[in-house]
Image: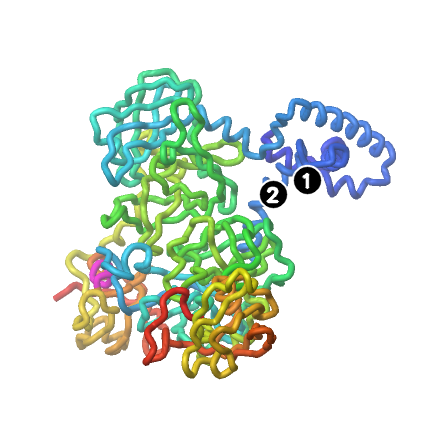
Amino acid sequence: MSVSDVIKDRAMGASMTRRRRKNFAQSVCIALVAAFAYFTATTACADGTNEKDSVFAEALAYAQPRCVKLYGAGTNVEAGYATGLIVSDDGLILTAQGIYLAGDRLRAVLADGSTYDTTLVRRSEPLQAALLKIDAKTPNYFPLAKEPIGEKGDWVLAVSNLFKVAANKEWLSANLGVISLRTRVDARHRTQDVPYDAEMLLVDAITSNPGASGGAVIDMDGRLVGMIGKLLESKNTNTRINYAVPADLLYKFVRNEPIEVAESPPASAGDGKASLGLRMFTVGGMRSPAYVDRIVPGSPAAKLGMKRDDLIMQIDGETVKDLRDYERIFATLRPGVEITIIVKRKRDVLSLQITPEAEK
Amino acid sequence: MYLAAGSRIAGALPIIAALSVVFQGDLRGDESVRQGYRLAPKAFRAAVARVAPSLVTIETFGGVGPSAGRAQRGTMSGINRPGEGPTTGMVVSSDGYIITSTFNFIRKPAIITVILSDGTRKVAELLGSDETRKLCVLKIEGVSDLPLFESAPRSELRVGQWAITVGVGYGDEEPAVSAGIISATSRVSQRAVQTDANISPANYGGPLLDVEGRVIGVCVPLTPGSADVGSGVEWYDSGIGFAVPLAGYEPILERMKKGEVIQPGKMGVTGKPADTKTGAGVVIDKVMRGSPAEKAGVKSGDRVVRADGDEVLDMTHLITIVGRFIAGDEIALELKRGEETVELKVKLEAGLEQGAPDEPAPRAPEPD
């Protein structure tokens, strides 16, 4: 029975107790147990260090010896240090990709202060993660769960080597937060698009700090929810994102199983380029919204009654902000495969089913 | 359910917890503290579920500024460069008025659409805005009976209570949630509540909730010193976030629905610190010609001792008090003119330039 089960039992038991308050024998029982509890509680407090004082202390104490500090080479703008997670008893360590992997030497400092050189086992492009190995027995490690851990709103603790403020044997820094959302985020790192191509677990603990990458995100029971990923920004918000690579994806990476990447283009029904018979209004440049300029007579668009000045806002669930988006998404369409487009016509929003034909 | 068979000991445990609290006189060693933390995430989720029907996703098309790629120099660079959206809003009346943040339209988009919680997409019209609170109102047509949220009375707010932010800015249909506490119940000239829950472009225009799912306020970027649309965004996810309470805001909301632009109110004076011998307050240095202060009879050399009923400590304080009002409001001042006490009301105006044309623009402190 886990701690949470016990809590649940107690919470549910409370309402039952109210119903049975008339039961005298039970009252006596309660009083006796209460007296015992009072005795033990006060005894526990005698040395001033009651474990129960700290709601998150046990989880953190569990996580600390399972995390390592990583020190490698950096640059002026990229930290040469990070955090790692021990994930096996024979020295496998997970971390995020970063400049520190590029140097000649990457050292891992364990919780007891012992230092080991690491070797790179492999990298994951979609997760922007790396698997390292040290030549040591590591009896304290995070078991990786096959299924996702935690849900939106659950408490999480981020444990990391942020700003390398924790020196040598000092414990890593802990930040409290909740799980915000599991989603895919269109991300970039500085000015470059990043090939992180998997679901991520957004959290509201601030993890987007130098050195935090590769840190542990754990729940109240110390279970590994995910690993703090590489520093990334969201294109949607233009902000740095605080996120973890979900544990179930790390599980696959460590086992060298394929990671499910974003949906591939729809199955091909016909080869060649697709055409709807639309000519777009391009005078304003590629940053302009996707307005229809002309419709080719007899084309799928014409048959559907599409009109000049219709604004294409969405193709198959993907938002079309501008002509660049339109062309990028359009390139993935296949002749003969029906799609849904959302169009603004004057003040109306229309959802249209349309099947592209092969370009003539 | 095996509990139905009855575990009496388990049933007794909460009482034990309660008793041990009584005996110890504080919460040390109390299992209920841990239990409270265990249950909080459930409450967070329930709060989010309660407001979810009133949340809307806003998408914009066209407008100025880059949507991706290299950052431009100047004001649109770095974090001031807006993201690609979408952004968040909330239904404030069942016939299709939506409140959101002006930050979400910083690019002045040509087209705004709103996706309601049931998936319906509508073209929206941007109506009025409140520059002092970074809020604005959208209208969508052809809707009725849209679900409304409940507001939390501001008087019930307490520093330290749970506060939850919700927003759809990461582009998922599901909103992202952040939890924290109320850090201060009144900030930025009483216009905002402060929280340490994350507030960013991901939830500007979205709600700050109490643990019951009632709306404490609308998340906005805000700084005490600036009314620029983008100011305050640099504090995103920093532990300092602001939300504008809607309780009591109805009159301004009605004006925004009519398309009005609410602006900061100015008096048209410059001040200097009062001589410590004469007492606290602000001594009026210059009174701009034709300014609200001149019309109300404020004279150079007057010492402002009270504004809006509060004792004025210094110029910064006076600016803060004036910030409680908007253009068109009247502010009550108590002045010392020599030995004489003068009480008057200044009707604040918007858009005053610094200094009259034939006067050099005064240096700091800025006119207010």
x%, y% of residue B240? 47, 52
Helix, strand or loop at disc 1? helix
The residue marked by circle 1 belongs to what chain?
A
x%, y% of residue A285? 18, 68
Note whether residue B106 is visible. Answer: yes
The dominant secondary structure in magenta is helix
Q: Determine contact: label 2, label 1, CB under 8 Å.
A: yes
A227 displayed left or right of B248: left
**Magenta segment: does it hold A327?**
yes
Question: If the image is split into quadrants, where does the N terminus of chain A sit?
Answer: top right
At 81% from the left and 40% from the top, the residue drawn is A20
Say which quarter of the image contains residue A80.
top left
Of the residues shown, which amino acid type is indicated by label 1?
A: Ala
Helix, strand or loop at disc 2? helix
* Residue carrying label 1: A11
At 47% from the left and 60% from the top, the residue drawn is B219
x%, y% of residue B280? 55, 62
What whole-number distance in Å separates the C-alpha atoms at marks 2 and 1? Answer: 10 Å
* Residue carrying label 2: B39
